[in-house]
Image (cartoon, rainbow, N blue to C red):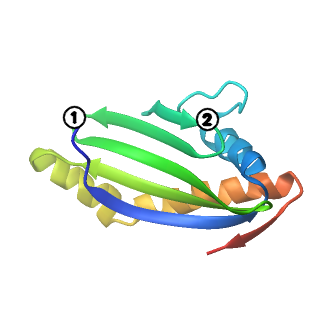
């Protein structure tokens, strides 16, 4: 498949090892870390424990990937990066892009997801530093 156009990247650093951070990512995005399910509008396209989760989807106005990558900075510190890649074909796609991306709504949803991941990690007893 041809690479989708890059939209943006957001990140947070969590004071936890990659395994704990990975469980927080799965809990927030996919429900049960032991039996993850893609959120509505997505399918799990790739799932490499402690490293990378790719949620992909499509509908008449867009084709998209929401990628979460974990970078182990130290044994007890992990950076979570959220990347969005998407194509918005035709006129309806351009209008949809303006509503979702141009309005700032996408940025709010991504930052909220990262905050929820950080909160889940904190709930597990770790400190979090936003960046």
Q: Position of residue 11 (x, y in %)?
A: 56, 65
- Tell me where residue 102 sits by quadrant: bottom left
* Real-space Cα separation, disc 1 to disc 2, in angstroms: 24 Å
Q: Is residue 68 above or below residue 41?
A: below
Q: Residues within 10 Å of mark 2 (few under 14, many from 20)?
A: some
Q: Position of residue 70 (x, y in %)?
A: 60, 54
User: Closest to the observer: 77 or 82?
Assistant: 77
Q: Is residue 50 above or below residue 95?
A: above
Q: Position of residue 50 (x, y in %)?
A: 66, 44
Number of residue marks: 2
Residue at the image position 28 percent from the left and 34 percent from the top: 59
Q: Check disc 2 and report the residue beneath it.
A: 30
Q: Is residue 106 left or right of residue 25?
A: left
Q: Quadrant of the C terminus?
A: bottom right
Q: Is residue 124 left or right of residue 23?
A: right
Q: Check disc 1 and report the residue beneath it.
A: 60
Q: Is residue 119 left or right of residue 66?
A: right
- Tell me where residue 15 sits by quadrant: bottom right
User: Closest to the observer: 79 or 66?
Assistant: 79
- Tell me where residue 95 sits by quadrant: bottom left
Which badge, 1 or 2, is on the more N-terminal residue?
2
Residue at the image position 72 percent from the left and 46 percent from the top: 24
């Amino acid at each position: 498949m041809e690479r989708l156009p890059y939209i943006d990247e957001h990140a947070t650093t969590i004071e936890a090892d990659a395994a704990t951070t990975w469980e927080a990512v799965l809990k927030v995005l996919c429900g049960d870390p032991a039996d993850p399910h893609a959120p509505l509008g997505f399918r799990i396209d790739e799932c490499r424990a402690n490293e990378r989760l790719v949620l992909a989807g499509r509908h008449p106005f867009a084709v998209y990937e929401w990628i979460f990558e974990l970078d182990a900075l130290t044994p007890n510190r992990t950076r979570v990066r959220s990347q969005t890649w998407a194509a918005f074909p035709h006129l309806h796609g351009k209008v949809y892009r303006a509503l979702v991306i141009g309005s700032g709504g996408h940025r709010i949803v991504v930052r909220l997801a990262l905050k929820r991941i950080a909160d889940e990690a904190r709930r597990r007893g770790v400190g979090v530093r936003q960046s």
